[in-house]
Image: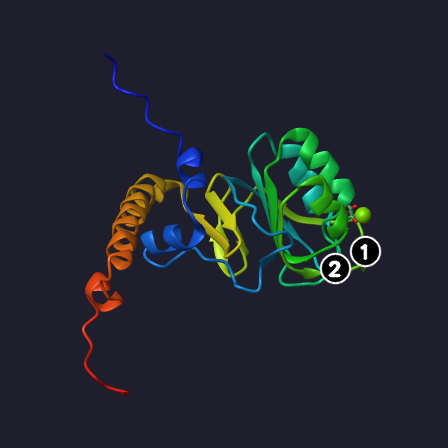
Amino acid sequence: MAAPAPRDPVARLADLDAATVHEAAGRTGDLDPGIRPIQSGATVAGRAVTAHCHPGDNLAIHRALLAAGPGDVLVVAAGGHLAGYWGEILAVAAQHKGVAGLVVDGGCRDTAALRRMGFPVWSAGVCVHGTVKRTAQSVNEPVVAGGVLVSPGDYVLADDDGVVVVPAARVGAVLDAAEARRDKEAAAFARLRAGATTFDVLGIEDVGAGG
Ligand SMILES: O=C([O-])CC(=O)C(=O)O
Ligand SMILES: [Mg+2]
């Protein structure tokens, strides 16, 4: 019998959570914690299509959407600027293309509509104020979003805890480590439920300081 085909990294990522992947990546790849989901209970895993916006101008996002395809996650660098960089119009167009979700280190708007239509967004805030569509800094070039360098094709995992990016070159090793960590935690839960202490399970050496 042929060996089973290796699972796609995106499918493996989708079975994990952001905190576990961040730990497995050597506590790296986590975007600024101010970047929060506008919905609860959504997990998005996919490959990054990037855009870099000038302050108050979302043309780069409109262009990035042309380059995006099914399963991609748009990652937008907006320098923390709170404006309505993303909203219902862009989400309807993105959903039509099968884009999985949006991460922006700036603002978004139309949030009730985005939740209603089930298009997941992680943003630095919500802002009614609109953006012009005049100039684009870059599309599908490496960007720094939420303090993390993100290149097109990097792997993105976003959930209720936040957003983690894994460079494409590291994804296999990080996924192996993350799955091992998840399995180890499952074993730890069983021991805790049988009465073991967190000190036993985590191997914490209590030096006794601080009472
Ligand atoms: O005007 C924009 O580009 C942002 C927005 O509100 C939408 O996409 O609906
Ligand atoms: Mg709108």
Q: Amino acid at mark 1?
A: Gly
Disc 1 secondary structure class: loop
Residue at left offset 44%, top offset 35%:
10
Q: Is residue 79 above or below residue 87?
A: below
Q: Residue 107, position in %: x, y?
A: 69, 58
Q: How is the image coloured?
A: rainbow
Q: Nearer the viewer, residue 25 or 12?
A: 12
Quadrant into which the N terminus falls? top left
Callout 2: few (<14), some (14-19), or many (20+) C-alpha neighbours within 10 Å?
A: many
Beta carbon at label 2 within 8 Å of ligand 1? no
Residue at left offset 24%, top offset 57%:
194
Quadrant in the picture for residue 65: top right
Q: Residue 120, position in %: x, y?
A: 63, 45
Quadrant in the picture for residue 97: top right
Are discs 2 and 1 less than 8 Å apart at CB?
yes
Q: Is residue 94 above or below residue 190?
A: above
Q: Which mark is drawn over residue 130? A: 1
Q: Nearer the viewer, residue 48 or 22?
A: 22
What is the CA distance from the residue labelled 2 to the residue labelled 1?
6 Å
Residue placed under numbered mark 2 in the picture: 83
Q: Is residue 202 above or below residue 11?
A: below
Which callout, 2 or 1, points at the residue further toward the start of the chain?
A: 2
Q: Nearer the viewer, residue 1 or 96?
A: 1
Q: Amino acid at mark 2?
A: Ala
Callout 1: few (<14), some (14-19), or many (20+) C-alpha neighbours within 10 Å?
A: some
Quadrant in the picture for residue 36: bottom right
